[in-house]
């Protein structure tokens, strides 16, 4: 999707740059498609540029508080909530 440069050239310069305050020619962030919403049947998907830290079973993207890899023995295959009947 091509972004249109909006802005005006009659504003003051931003200190330390050659861009004006409302300069439409400043570099713009890229457009990131949003993820999908969750439903009762399945979880939603994250935005396309997201890094998934935990998908339910894998801690490979995590580090321990003391540095190094996390201890996988603390993680069961999936989280199962415990319900108490009252």
Image (spheres, rainbow, N blue to C red):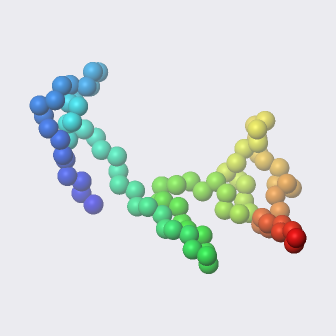
Q: Position of residue 46 (x, y in %)?
A: 53, 61
Furthest toward the left, the residue is 10
Q: Position of residue 80 (x, y in %)?
A: 80, 67
Quarter of the picture containing the N terminus is bottom left
Furthest toward the bottom, the residue is 41
Q: Position of residue 68 (x, y in %)?
A: 76, 41
Q: Quadrant of residue 57?
A: bottom right
Total numbered circles: 0
* Side of 67 relative to 43 (left or right): right
Closest to the observer, 60 or 9: 9
- Name the residue at 71% across, 53% down: 60
- Name the residue at 78% across, 35% down: 66
Closest to the observer, 18 or 6: 6
Furthest toward the top, the residue is 15
Q: Is residue 48 above or below residue 37?
A: above
Q: Is residue 77 visible?
A: no
- Name the residue at 73% across, 54% down: 59
Q: Is residue 68 above or below residue 32?
A: above
Quarter of the picture containing the C terminus is bottom right
Q: Is residue 58 visible?
A: yes
Q: Quadrant of residue 58?
A: bottom right
* Side of 79 relative to 1 (left or right): right
Q: Position of residue 40 (x, y in %)?
A: 61, 76
- Name the residue at 66% across, 62% down: 55
* Side of 13 relative to 42 (left or right): left
């Amino acid at each position: 999707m091509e972004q249109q440069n909006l802005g005006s050239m009659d504003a003051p310069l931003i200190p330390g740059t050659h861009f004006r305050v409302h300069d439409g020619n400043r570099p713009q962030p890229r457009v990131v498609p949003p993820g999908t919403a969750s439903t009762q049947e399945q979880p939603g998907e994250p935005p396309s540029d997201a890094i998934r830290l935990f998908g339910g079973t894998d801690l490979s993207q995590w580090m321990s508080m003391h540095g190094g890899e996390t201890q996988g023995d603390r993680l069961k295959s999936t989280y199962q909530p415990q319900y108490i009947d009252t």
